[in-house]
Amino acid sequence: MSNRSPILAPLALAAILATGFGVVLAVLVCWVDQLVGNYLRAAQAETSRQVYVATNGTPLLQSYSPWDLRQVFHTLEGEEIVVPPGDRPPLLDGASLREPSQLVRFEKLPWTRRIVQFVPPLRPAMLWYFIHDGLPEGAGYFVAYDVKTKLCAGYLGMKGFRSERPSPGEWLPVDSRLMAWLTAFNGLTWYGGISRQMARGIPDPEMGPWRCYLISGDQLLEIDFKEHSVRSVLEAEGLMSLNLMERAADASSQVAPRVPPELSAFLALRMPGRVVVMHPHRAERRTYLLPDEARQRHIQFFELTGQTALLLMDRFFFGERTYLLLWIDPAGKVLRREEVVGWKRTAWNAPATRAWVSAAAVPTPLGLAAFVATELANQYRQAGDLGAGQYVASAFWVAWPALIAVTALSAGLTALVWRRQRRYGAAGTALWMVFVVLGGVPGLLAYRFHRRWPVRQACPACGETVPRDRDACAHCGEDFPAPSPKGVEVFAP
Ligand SMILES: [Zn+2]
């Protein structure tokens, strides 16, 4: 086997070594990178800010200083909101509404996204799960387990409660994209983290802990885990995400009242180009058209008084976080627009610096290209306003000098390979040069250390220093003289 291609085994070994060297190098560079980044951030003494909305609809900036760990709340106009130390003003729960159209479609959902757990508070007798079949135009059913006996307690499908698993015809259709992006159910569900509504208690008993809302095709369904019922509360095309939200109190009320006001809760539903606010048990319904700059983005939706909504969007871009706040009327007209910088970018986080640091961490043309196409491109993707091909192109556009430098370095390193191959009279020079062109610095290290190299000594015939792992000189071809007998040799008869 090894005789057929004597180069294949050492090449495979070198490839494994190159991967190992590459990982060690990347870890070292990332570690230094973090130290420098943290140092620069601390040296700037920059406070980072986060945007919240008070119960009366006033946006608040929470500043957080890395030095004294004190949280301070200000209005956009700079007025400080005084609250007891360690406390914060009562905040409004907006609805987080995703815009899934930009995201990739799953052919088959992973298990982690196919099961949703519902955890009603106060020691429930049963735990409910939604099980999705994982298919793109998929469907699913609810199943309950008894907390004490751990046995299956029944199922819930289109036609109500069953003790047997419902047949697929009774399953509730749910688009797998909504399952994947966690937008099919309202915020009272667990996909792995606790929702804010859950943590703060349910503001409206009518949408209380025993009920959840599900986007099923063009229907909004209300699932009641106590009554074991499923009913349709709205029919609308293109439902893509929903959440519970509170409606702001009167704008003239205090930002930080001693007693938080009673807020009314609603369901916010996102459809293409608009958000509908409704209550499933009352004939209340309000529609807000979304302005163009919000249509393709993930929004936090806050309904204020006086037919106004506040849209809060944030954007991460190479270590910089900026918030965009839009006040809109029901027709989608922007009444007011504010931008707030949450984290300022240091020079260390600038795209070009990132490209060069990546080149130091992954000094191989192939590896760096892969890194640029995924990690660096992902930073552009997070900015949220670039199309699928554009963010990869942007990443390569900023990284091309680093890519050329790494490629040139790797090409230069092949000179070292060529010299070593010649000095040791080793085979496969062209192949090893290609290996190092592709593998860069880790490739060269792997080439150097993947094998033992023979001792080199001067040839008695021509005087050149040549490898002594063979019978003849690699330079002049003369046979080396046999070593002089020491008198202890054993001869075969
Ligand atoms: Zn020689």
Image (cartoon, rainbow, N blue to C red):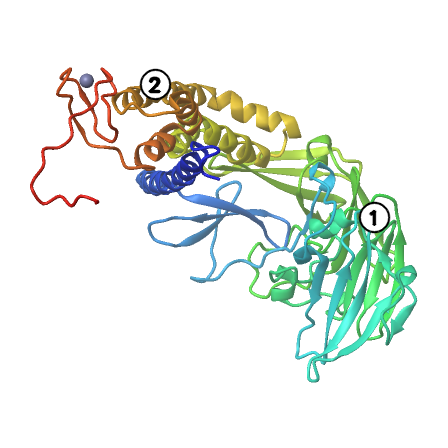
Q: Tell which tag, 1 or 2, sits nearer the viewer.
A: 2
- Single out the residue that lies furthest toward the left: 487
Cα distance in 3D space between marks 1 and 2: 53 Å
Q: Is residue 42 visible?
A: no
Where disc 2 sits, the SS reads helix
Q: Residue at x 56, y 35 (%)?
A: 378
Where disc 1 sits, the SS reads loop
Front one among 394 and 492? 492
Picture coordinates of residue 235, whole percent (x, y): 90, 51
Which badge, 1 or 2, comes first in the chain's sequence? 1
Q: Residue at x 71, y 62 (%)?
A: 116
Residue 386 in the figure: left or right of residue 71: right
Q: Which residue is mark 1?
A: 137
Figure quarter occupied by ligand 1: top left
As displayed, is residue 282 above or below residue 30? Answer: below
Q: Amino acid at mark 1?
A: Glu
- Quarter holding the C terminus is top left
Q: Residues within 10 Å of mark 1 (few under 14, many from 20)?
A: few
Q: Amino acid at mark 2?
A: Gly
Q: Which mark is residue 171?
A: none
